[in-house]
Image: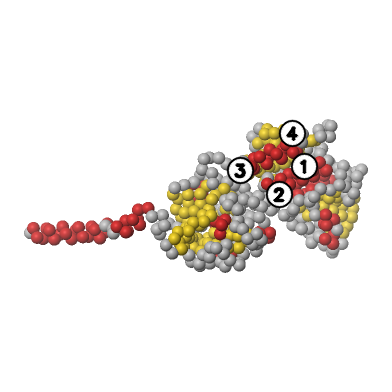
Amino acid sequence: MHRRTGLILALLTLVSCIAGCARPADLATTRSDPDAPQASPLRIRDGQIEIDAIATGIDDTDPVEFFLIPRTSGKDYEALAITSVKPSQIHDALVKLGMSPGKPTSAPARRFWPRGERVIMTFRWMEGDRRIERRAEDLIIDAQTGAPLPQVGFVFTGSYVLPQDDGRGQDLYAANVADPQSIASNYNEPGTVLDVPRRAPQGEMYGFQKRHPAYPLAKGQPITITLRPEMTDGSKRVIDLTLHVRANKDGTLTYELVTTSGKPRIRETGMPAVLSHISSLIDEGKDPFVQVTVAENLSVMDVRQAYGALVALEQSKGLRLEPPAPGELFYEAFFPDEAWREASNRVQSVVEIHLDATTHADNARLVVPLIDGQTRTMSIVPHALAEALKSPETARTRTAFLFVTPDITYGEIQNWARPLMATHPVIYVFLSRHSTTLPAAPSPLPNP
């Protein structure tokens, strides 16, 4: 009897050990080894996100457009790494870390700067027994300079949403379903979760960014990608400002820079002080997004001068000029390519409105492109403009040119521009040929 009891106890102990005991090596693995395989390809711990990915094996002569894509993207030939994690899951994980999505770029909305707080991304992999960890920016070089991309992080723009009006489900997260399905891009991709913090149009970047030859990640190489918020103390990079430009009775201009709450930050009669203030914010690590409003009594020359100074700061230091308020002209409207004056230099038809120096407020000469390639010229008043452009003979175009004299005011230009905006949102303002002109700003808008 005692023998049988002892045997039973021994068997129970053996079964219990088989079910629950582990070898010392296994215990070390199951406790907290950060490089051990995990059940989930996305993990949140220690204030950061870990994502399991694999290298695509892209050659160092091939153009790179993406740091990371989901495996459903199909853009492996242009990416450094792919993952089974959905873009929306990474979005949600960043939100769980306390971040809020910003706004992606949008050419139709005239938003050419990705907006949002920044994320630091690193790639980690093994080379034999050696663990390698590099910032994501180090893995791509600028083919023109041979230098890696600057270590400035990525903007959490958060993609955009595709509304579903069929009543059968929730709205769709664009990065999950819409081409190119990007998690992190190295150009301004409207559908990406993470964008680069600069103006980087796809057409200007393509072919000039390649994988760094010092990091030849083999196809299928396991990679752990980490994401963490740049700011962990509650501070923010993004600061919203509005610049009001007003004309005084004595002909001088007043510049007032205010916060979103309306609290003035600076009020000056000269643009240099405003530029210096904004420049100091950039030096402090802020990303100032500035919306500009100009009074209707400003002359077109004053408008160009104000915008010209802001564009110079945008190009040199990274001031972010915001889209205009509804019904207002975007700053690039005042800096057209002078070659477009001649119809032979345009790649599409445009509507022309020529304002006479003495009657520009009430009457203009309208030149309408026709579907047969000809044009029709007529006299027009502002309130009849929209109706005149509805003729079935009018060529399809979304672009309009206004030819004005330097004494015209912004308000008088708007009398003609506002009736056009619904049907012709791309508007440029040309000064008469004898006017003094300012250097043109680079335009991301379509060539007419």
Q: Which residue sits at x=45%, y=50%? A: 44
Describe the element under mark 2 as helix, strand or loop: helix
Kindly identify the amino acid type of the residue bearing the numbered disc 4.
Glu
Which mark lies nearer to you, 1 or 3?
Answer: 3
> Label 1 belongs to which residue?
306
Disc sitting over residue 285 in the figure: 3
Describe the element under mark 1 as helix, strand or loop: helix
Q: Nearer the viewer, residue 357 or 392?
A: 357
Q: Which residue sits at x=65%, y=64%? A: 207
Q: Tags 3 and 4 in contact by the CB under 8 Å rule? A: no
Vertical side of 256 occupied by 335: above or below: below
Rounded to the nearest angstrom, the CA distance separating label 3 from label 4 is: 24 Å
Q: Position of residue 284 (x, y in %)?
A: 61, 41
Kindly identify the amino acid type of the residue bearing the numbered disc 3.
Gly
Q: Is residue 224 left or right of residue 244?
A: left
> Label 4 belongs to which residue?
268
Which mark lies nearer to you, 2 or 1?
Answer: 2
Q: Are there few (<14), some (14-19), or many (20+) residues within 10 Å of tag 2?
A: few
> Label 2 belongs to which residue?
315
Rounded to the nearest angstrom, the CA distance separating label 2 from label 4 is: 23 Å
Quarter of the N terminus within the rendering: bottom left
Q: Earlier in the sequence, mark 4 or mark 1?
A: 4
Q: Earlier in the sequence, mark 1 or mark 3?
A: 3
Rounded to the nearest angstrom, the CA distance separating label 1 from label 3 is: 24 Å
Vertical side of 277 occupied by 38: above or below: below
Q: Earlier in the sequence, mark 2 or mark 4?
A: 4
Q: Tags 2 and 4 in contact by the CB under 8 Å rule? A: no
Q: Are there few (<14), some (14-19), or many (20+) residues within 10 Å of tag 4?
A: some
Kindly identify the amino acid type of the residue bearing the numbered disc 2.
Gln
Which mark lies nearer to you, 3 or 4?
Answer: 3
Quarter of the C terminus within the rendering: bottom right
Q: Is residue 387 visible?
A: no
